Image (cartoon, helix red, strand yellow):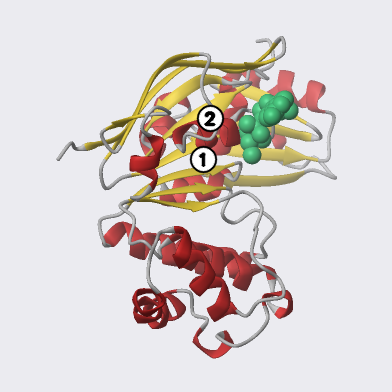
Amino acid sequence: MSTVAIDLSCVRKSYGDKIVVDGLSFAVASGECFGLLGPNGAGKSTIARMVLGMVAPDTGKMTVLGEPVPARARLARARIGVVPQFDNLELEFTVRENLLVFGRYFNMSAREVEAVVPALLEFARLESKADARVAELSGGMKRRLTLARALINDPHLLVMDEPTTGLDPHARHLIWERLRLLLARGKTILLTTHFMEEAERLCDRLCVLEAGRKIAEGEPRALIDEQIGCQVIEIYGGNPHELSSLIRPYARHIEVSGETLFCYAPDPEQVLVQLRGRVGLRLLQRPANLEDVFLRLTGREMER
Ligand SMILES: Nc1ncnc2c1ncn2[C@@H]1O[C@H](COP(=O)(O)OP(=O)(O)O)[C@@H](O)[C@H]1O
Ligand SMILES: [Mg+2]
């Protein structure tokens, strides 16, 4: 069997005169968690829908689980589980009924579905909610049910479109833990997200998207080291322009986003000395993360 789960080559998609996916190529290895990271409108859902064969690219080639897509998407889909961006559960049905109904889409018999339901409920930590109507569940529970539902056909590949958007931190951590369990079981995950932290925690590799274009690709840690490679000091509460001229000699680079000044400093102490004694400033020193990479790549660096 191929070790490449998804292969996109020079894929383009426009709606009207708007280019939504602009010559995108990437490959996802079997067993990895691959992230599509970008802000709203970057094209993440369109790419996910193309991988599923729901949207056809204008040009380019795609192979998913060894099948050319969209031509043979139906064959690929039999081994894919989908978590759509917006839950589409049957709200008036119970948790168990939702799983039973969904199993029929995969031509599973009632007996076959019933055999897997207990393990799915356990996976989703919904054992005690089996007979509750979906309308009564919290957002996190609904998301976990959607995840359990996606596993009903024991798929090799999971396509998850923003699986934790809208959830509180506790619910989000629970989903992350479940996803890591799936990866430990050898599943492949294509995950879209606009949460840098989510991408950094879960993804083996990721592709950073802006307006349908890939602006970076790699392992999160490697991207952070390549693009930033030093400590960050966040400075709030002063005049960013005045402060940036003060600390510029000690910074590798400086960025301003909103009211925050980000100073990337090989030797943070030198910067902190300059700011000592200034009233009204709040400082936070931390290691670099993917958000810094994104700010850097989207070109909001201040002139030096
Ligand atoms: N069916 C569609 N018709 C017209 N424009 C669309 C359609 N689907 C998406 N778009 C546009 O394509 C761009 C990317 O959308 P989408 O893939 O949903 O991005 P993301 O999931 O990253 O937020 C947006 O500007 C969106 O308005
Ligand atoms: Mg989307």
How crowded is the residue under tag 1: few (<14 C-alpha within 10 Å), some, or many (20+)?
many
Up-down: is 7 above or below 110? above
Labelled pair 2, 1 in contact (Cβ < 8 Å): yes
Q: Residue at x 59, y 45 (%)?
A: 195
Image location (x, y in percent) of residue 172 = 58, 63
What is the three-letter code of the residue carrying label 1?
Asn
The residue at which mark 1 appears reads as 289
Instruction: Give left or right: position of 217 versus 247.
Output: left
Would you identify the image quadrant in which residue 278 lies?
A: top right
- Residue 293 tag number: 2
Could you tell me which quadrant the C terminus lies in? top right
Depth check, front residue: 44 or 51 = 51
| Residue 274 appears in the rendering | no
Instruction: Give left or right: position of 31 versus 102.
Output: left
Query: Total marks drawn?
Result: 2
Image location (x, y in percent) of residue 299 = 63, 17
Q: Residue at x 50, y 31 (%)?
A: 50
Would you identify the image quadrant in which residue 247 lies?
A: top right
Could you tell me which quadrant the N terminus lies in? top left
Ligand 1 in which quarter: top right
